[in-house]
Amino acid sequence: MLSCDEATKLIALKKYRKIRLIDRIRLSMHLIACKYCKSFEVFNNKLEDSIEHTCSNISTSNSEITSEKKTDLKNLINKNIQK
Amino acid sequence: MSEQSLNNLEPQLWVDRYADQLFRYALIRVNKRETAEDLVQETFISGLKQKSSFRAESTEKTWLYTILKNKIIDYYRSNEKKYSGKFYDINDEHGTDRYFHHEGSRTGTWKENQQTIIFNESADNQLLSGEFYTILQNCIERLPDKWATVFRLKNIEELETKTICKELNLSSSNLWVIIHRAKLQMQECMKNNWVNEK
């Protein structure tokens, strides 16, 4: 039987590494019996969804420096070139 | 490869050529616009100061990226210090002891004060309120930058674990502990800040 420590580790890492078949089976058996780990599994899914959502925001909008900041940067560079 | 390989740096064109790319690279790794902008600015300033270290075998772009990467590593270091001895201490060697018994016959089971049921089983497909995600977002933002970066690198750049470890200077076992613990801590954060009324 998996411990809760091991079960939550498998859940937390499933997106990051492959889980052996035997561990998948042990995990699903554990989750039938343990409501705390089951709740953690649902939390983990919501968390991964949320991270994915934030990430798609970074890659689309928001990923440019504002034009004011660019002007500042250009001025700063010109000032430092002349030094 | 034309002019740059002749050891010509063209700082007056850096902003138009590289600022957005460098900014985005930094933003994924630090997640705050202001911090990312500051890092880009510091990169340009350092670039000007270290002009003489530029070698023709490198391109201007790669060279600026190298400077930025070092700036990010310095930033992580100062960021980690902030958490030292606290809830999210990156160097805390106790792994998941806060959550699970680590001695005796109950080793590996949840400690009583950490037994949490945020969700019942049917909640998995349930759409949650915007409030839930706002609070969750706050919990994620409290993570040390290096930890949160692990999650973003996996999602945005779809990096292999090996590459993530190399970039963040972590061993793979370190990385597993960080992901596991960060998620347990975020659940604890949610438990303390969000009440599920359903």
Image (cartoon, helix red, strand yellow):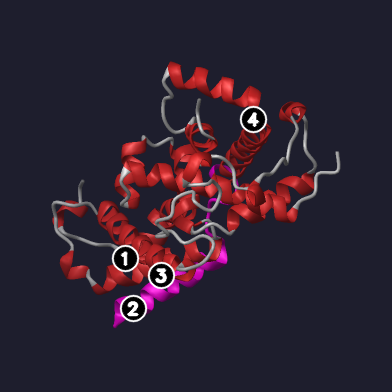
Q: Nearer the viewer's eye, disc 4 or disc 1?
A: 4
**Residue flagged by tag 3: what amino acid is it?**
Ser
Query: Which residues fall within the magenta stretch?
Result: A59-83
Residue A80: assigned label: 2
Name the side, left or right, on which B133 lies relative to B99.
right
Q: Nearer the viewer, residue B32 or B62?
A: B32
Q: Is B195 or A79 nearer to us in this picture? A: B195
Q: Does the magenta segment cover residue A69? A: yes
Between marks 1 and 3, how big is the CA–CA gap? 28 Å
Residue A8 is situated, as x and y percent measured from the top left of the image, at: 54, 36
Label 4 with label 3: CB-CB less than 8 Å: no
Residue drawn at x 78%, y 33% as measured from the top left: B127
Q: Residue furthest bottom?
A: A83
Q: Is residue B97 magenta?
A: no
- Mark 1 neighbour density, 10 Å: few (under 14) some (14–19) many (20 or more): many
Report the residue at 73% width, 55% height from top: B193
Against A24, is B153 above or below? below
Give the residue type at disc 4. Answer: Cys
Whole-number angstrom distance, CA of label 4 to CA of label 3 = 40 Å
The residue drawn where x is 37% and y is 66% is: B77
What number is the disc on residue B78?
A: 3
B49 vs B159: above or below: below
Residue found farthest to the right:
B197
Q: Mark 2: which amino acid?
A: Asn
Q: Quick check: do tags 4 and 1 share a chain? A: no
Dot 4 alpha-carbon crowd within 10 angstroms: few under 14, some 14 to 19, many 20 or more: some
